[in-house]
Image: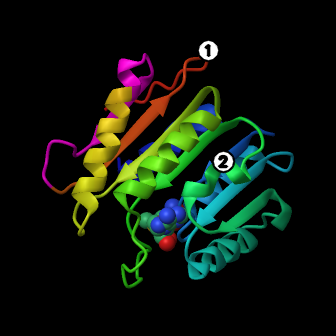
Amino acid sequence: MRVTERAHQSVRAVVRPGDHVVDATAGNGHDTLLLARLVGPDGRVIAFDVQEEAIAATRCRLAVNGIEEGRVFFVNGSHTMLRQHVDRPVAVVMFNLGYLPGSDHAHTTTRDETLIALAEGWETLRESGILSVVCYRGHPGGAEEAAGVLEYAEGLQDQGASVVISGQKETQEGPFLVIMQKEGKQQVRTGP
Ligand SMILES: C[S@@+](CC[C@H](N)C(=O)[O-])C[C@H]1O[C@@H](n2cnc3c(N)ncnc32)[C@H](O)[C@@H]1O
């Protein structure tokens, strides 16, 4: 199973209708669409992307799939501003790192910004909530960013959080998924 599919599986296990959730990297809208479906008409997705092009692509995907506009609030800006736009505990914060497929790679996520956003995301999670992070290492800066995510996850694990890593962590370049979960009754059981 691809790591993006595994990320979707983990998110499905946690999100309930009416939840508020965050897509930290909207991109082409695949993750935003899944989240919008899961939260339903009474929930909310807050979706970030630094590129207008990505927000337009995501809006288009939602419209084609019949999701009404009000269910997703877009922020055309960095996920480092996460807490400014989230006013209640969220079930999930999803990251799919790297660059917009088909773009010029000028707006790739960066280690420093990702680490700020992960910390802000962790603070906003509700009980049993998860950070879901798909990491890629084949592009410049990707390996450093992925190493930063693993260090962050290890720090949380040391403090008692549950961390599950799946995918090609042991290879030099393959993608991998990191799921970090807050304590609570509803634990994700996605294996490696
Ligand atoms: C791999 S794509 C995301 C794919 C997307 N989740 C999907 O389902 O199609 C990564 C996205 O992160 C965005 N990005 C880069 N830096 C960012 C930042 N600091 N804050 C928010 N988005 C950022 C890029 O513009 C790009 O669209």
User: What secondary structure is marked by label 2?
Assistant: helix
What span is in magenta? Answer: 156-172
Q: Nearer the viewer, residue 55 or 14?
A: 55
Q: Nearer the viewer, residue 51 or 81?
A: 81
In this orientation, does residue 175 appear? Answer: no
**Horizontal side, residue 129 vs residue 143: left or right:** right
Asked whether residue 171 is drawn in magenta, I would say yes
Residue 91 to residue 86: above or below: above
Task: Residue at 65% x, 79% y: name it.
Answer: 56
Residue 189 to residue 153: above or below: above
Q: Which mark is residue 177?
A: none
First in residue order: circle 2 vs circle 1: 2
Asked whether residue 25 is drawn in magenta, I would say no
Which x, y percent locates residue 189?
46, 24
**Horizontal side, residue 96 vs residue 54: left or right:** left
Q: Quadrant of residue 58?
A: bottom right
- Binning the other alpha carbons within 10 Å of mark 2 as few (below 14), some (14 to 19) or many (20 upward) gives some
Task: Residue at 35% x, 56% y: name it.
Answer: 111
* Amino acid of disc 2: Arg
Q: From the image, tell me which residue sits under label 2.
A: 83
- Check the image and name the residue furthest to the bottom: 104
Q: How is the image coloured?
A: rainbow
Which x, y percent locates residue 110?
37, 62
**Horizontal side, residue 26 vs residue 60: left or right:** left
In this orientation, does residue 153 appear? Answer: yes
Q: From the image, tell me which residue sits under label 1.
A: 185
